[in-house]
């Protein structure tokens, strides 16, 4: 059986659209009980952003806008 590092190396050689599909397929197979909890830095950053949003210091974006930016950045949309 291949090691995680061998699989990761093979996955990194895939085109961006295939990598994105692989991420989705793997995520769908991961039970919520297996999720790794966020670390303290992630929680602190989320709290900082939430506070900035609540104070009107930053704005949000719709899911459609976020998805479009992410797909473009990943090379899935031209």
Image (tube, rainbow, N blue to C red):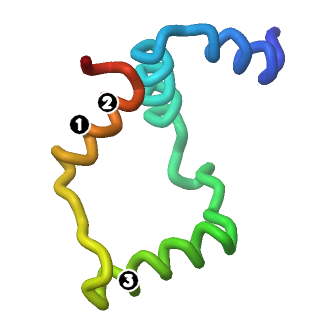
Mark 1 neighbour class, 10 Å CA radius: few under 14, some 14 to 19, many 20 or more: some
Badge 2 marks a residue whose secondary structure is helix
Distance between mark 2 and mark 1 Cα atoms: 5 Å
Checking the image for residue 52, the label placed there is 3
Q: Is the Cβ of the residue at disc 2 closer than 8 Å to that at disc 1?
A: yes
Badge 1 marks a residue whose secondary structure is helix
Q: Which residue occupies 49% across, 80% down?
A: 48
Location of residue 43 by image quarter: bottom right
Q: Is the Cβ of the residue at disc 3 closer than 8 Å to that at disc 1?
A: no
Location of residue 12 by image quarter: top right
Q: Residue furthest front?
A: 57
Estimate the x, y position of residue 52 in percent, counting from the top left: 37, 83
Please, is residue 41 above or below residue 3 in the view? below
Estimate the x, y position of residue 62 in percent, counting from the top left: 17, 55
Distance between mark 3 and mark 2 Cα atoms: 26 Å
Please, is residue 27 above or below residue 55 in the view? above
Estimate the x, y position of residue 3 in percent, counting from the top left: 83, 18
Checking the image for residue 68, the label placed there is 1
Please, is residue 55 above or below residue 30 in the view? below
Identify which residue, 12 or 69, lies in the foreground.
69
Q: Earlier in the sequence, mark 3 or mark 2?
A: 3
Estimate the x, y position of residue 1 in percent, counting from the top left: 81, 9
Q: Determine which residue is flagged by label 2.
A: 71
Q: Residue furthest bottom?
A: 55
Mark 3 neighbour class, 10 Å CA radius: few under 14, some 14 to 19, many 20 or more: few
Badge 3 marks a residue whose secondary structure is helix
Distance between mark 3 and mark 1 Cα atoms: 24 Å
Please, is residue 48 above or below residue 62 in the view? below
């Amino acid at each position: 059986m291949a090691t995680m590092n061998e699989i990761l190396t093979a996955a990194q050689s895939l085109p961006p659209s295939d990598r994105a599909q692989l991420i989705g397929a793997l995520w769908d197979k991961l039970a919520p009980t297996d999720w790794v909890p966020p670390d303290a830095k992630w929680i602190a950053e989320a709290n900082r952003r939430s506070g900035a949003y609540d104070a009107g210091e930053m704005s949000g974006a719709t899911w459609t806008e976020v998805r479009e930016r992410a797909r473009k950045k990943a090379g899935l949309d031209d």
